[in-house]
Image (spheres, rainbow, N blue to C red):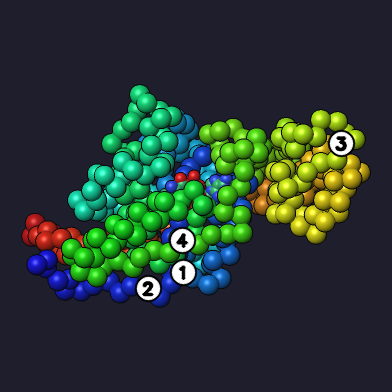
Amino acid sequence: MSPAATNPVPIPDGRVLAGIRATSDQHIGNYLGAIQNFVDLQERFECIYSIVDLHSLTTLEETAELAANVHETALILLAAGIDPARSILYVQSHVPEISELHLLLSMVVPNGWLLRVPTFKEKAREQPDNVNYGLVGYPVLQTADIVMYKATHVPVGQDQLAHLELAREIVRRFNRHFGETFPEPRPELTEAPLVMGLDGARKMSKSLGNHISIAGDEAATAKRVRSAVTDPKRARRNDPGRPEVCNVYALHEFFDPEERPRIYEQCTSAGIGCVDCKDMLAGAINERFRELRARRDDLAAKPETVRAILADGADRARAIAGEVLREVQERMGLPPTQTSR
Ligand code: TYM
């Protein structure tokens, strides 16, 4: 029998938690699959957003730039519309309670569950010389991010669904052992849960280099879009295209949906070529992000303001995290902390 909690933290009605890895180049896959939802969900829920710098360490990529990448990610999130007056925005490593919760949760997670996770197998293949302990525990740390606040809803792209399912299993197992503590977190997908990259074949991802940056300038965006793979069977300008196999056409759905019927008609009748179609898409992407980019540049000129927002976010996050951690420690039978006097 496990000890009961003397003062359990109530499960909130609806609380959102989402994480995003720190990179120098947040892309439109992140935006359409997740960031857009982070912003929208602020209307309906209490929201907590974490820039997960500890997770970034599992691949040891870009660690020299990690602090700069955290800052850049904060700029994008704020420019996209995360409102620090309403939501909590913080850096994962600034809330050390998460690392402790990660350790405590690890006691209830069978290794077999973790070794089966598709993203673990993929990373182990990609970095055979660095299959580290942190990589195995990645989804446990992700679960700690979520349950630290007893979050009920988690906006993610499709690639995170396996991690979310594991988080739910960990919650069930924890609750079975130690009493009803955490809600089972529910994934929230957008209309674009899986944005394909410029190669048209794989998920858009910075590590695959097939991405379009949110913050790129207009000329760079146009150049990237020009490099996109379209219908491989459309060899010449006068060949009719097949929009249904073309990722550029798919992206038009998210950036200028009202133009899609016309593009379909003109592509299939060879009225427009792929270059025209790509230039239209680049124009629509630039249009969509013009204000966001301007806000990002304004914030970039005020690093102290951004740091203060993150510091305040960490304070607010720790206030919740401390309570939940105390409850978990008690439920798991750890002796209460004593002050020395
Ligand atoms: P990350 O940083 O790779 O991606 C951030 C969010 O963007 C979504 N996303 C996409 N959606 C659609 N199409 C794409 N091509 C695409 N690429 C990325 C991701 O699904 C994600 O929602 N493990 C997480 C970070 C994390 C987290 C958490 C998420 C850590 N702790 C707690 C939610 C809750 C990750 O690597 O995301």
- The residue beneath circle 1 is 46
**Disc 2 residue crowd, few under 14, some 14–19, many 20+, Cα 10 Å:** some
Identity of the residue drawn at 24% across and 60% down: 173
- The nearer-to-camera label among 1 and 4 is 4
Amino acid type indicated by mark 4: Pro
Which corner quadrant holds the C terminus? Answer: bottom left
Residue 109: x and y in percent read 24, 51
Mark sitting earlier along the chain (4/3): 4
Residue 38: x and y in percent read 54, 60
Distance between mark 1 and mark 4 Cα atoms: 16 Å
User: For residue 9, what is the image quadrant?
Assistant: bottom left
Judged from the image, the secondary structure of the residue bearing numbered disc 2 is loop
Comparing 2 with 233, the one in front is 233
Q: Which mark is residue 239?
A: 3
Comparing 329 with 113, the one in front is 113
Mark sitting earlier along the chain (1/4): 1
Which residue is most to the top? 129
Q: Do the residues labelled 1 and 2 touch (CB within 8 Å)?
A: yes
Distance between mark 3 and mark 2 Cα atoms: 57 Å
Judged from the image, the secondary structure of the residue bearing numbered disc 4 is strand
Residue 134: x and y in percent read 31, 38
- The nearer-to-camera label among 4 and 2 is 4
Q: Are marks 1 and 3 in contact (CB under 8 Å)?
A: no
